[in-house]
Image (cartoon, helix red, strand yellow):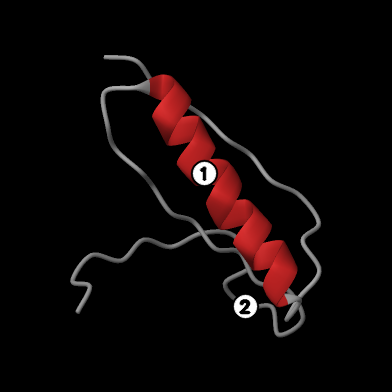
């Protein structure tokens, strides 16, 4: 069960949804590959139209 929640845009919209997720690791190529797989899975499911995506990899 997930305990952490964060608000994103479209809080009061009944026709739009925004989903956010994160992946952590120490290999940017691996992380980018996993992000691509998640996005491809979301498109393949076809429950909703994906309008925009944004990926940010932060190196610390």
Instruction: State the quadrant of the N terminus.
Output: bottom left
Q: Nearer the viewer, residue 34 or 1?
A: 34
Q: Nearer the viewer, mark 1 or mark 2?
A: 1
**Cβ atoms at labels 1 and 2 below 8 Å apart:** no
The residue identified by callout 2 is 12
Q: Secondary structure at mark 2?
A: loop
Relative to 52, say whether 26 is above or below.
above
Sort mark 1 into few (<14), some (14-19) or many (20+) by Cα contacts within 10 Å.
some
**Drawn side of residue 9 relative to residue 29, left or right:** right
Sort mark 2 into few (<14), some (14-19) or many (20+) by Cα contacts within 10 Å.
few
Q: Nearer the viewer, residue 35 or 60?
A: 35
Hey, which residue is sitting farthest bottom in the picture? 14
| Real-space Cα separation, disc 1 to disc 2, in angstroms | 27 Å
**Drawn side of residue 9 relative to residue 51, left or right:** left
Residue 11: percent from left, percent from top: 57, 72
Q: Which residue is depicted at the point 76% across and 49% down?
A: 52
Q: Which residue is depicted at the point 76% across and 76% down?
A: 46
The residue identified by callout 1 is 35
Q: Dividing the picture into quarters, in which one does residue 51 lie?
A: bottom right
**Drawn side of residue 1 relative to residue 17, left or right:** left
Residue 9: percent from left, percent from top: 59, 60
Relative to 21, say whether 60 is above or below.
above
Hey, which residue is sitting farthest top in the picture? 60
Residue 32: percent from left, percent from top: 51, 32
Residue 45: percent from left, percent from top: 69, 75
- Labels in figure, total: 2
Q: Secondary structure at mark 1?
A: helix
Q: Nearer the viewer, residue 47 or 19?
A: 47
Instruction: State the quadrant of the C terminus.
Output: top left
Relative to 36, say whether 45 is above or below.
below
As drawn, the label of residue 4 is none
């Amino acid at each position: 069960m997930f305990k952490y929640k964060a608000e994103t845009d479209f809080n009061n919209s009944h026709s739009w949804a925004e989903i956010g997720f994160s992946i952590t690791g120490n290999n940017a190529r691996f992380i980018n590959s996993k992000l691509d797989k998640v996005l491809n899975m979301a498109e393949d499911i076809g429950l909703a139209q994906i309008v925009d995506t944004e990926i940010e990899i932060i190196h610390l």
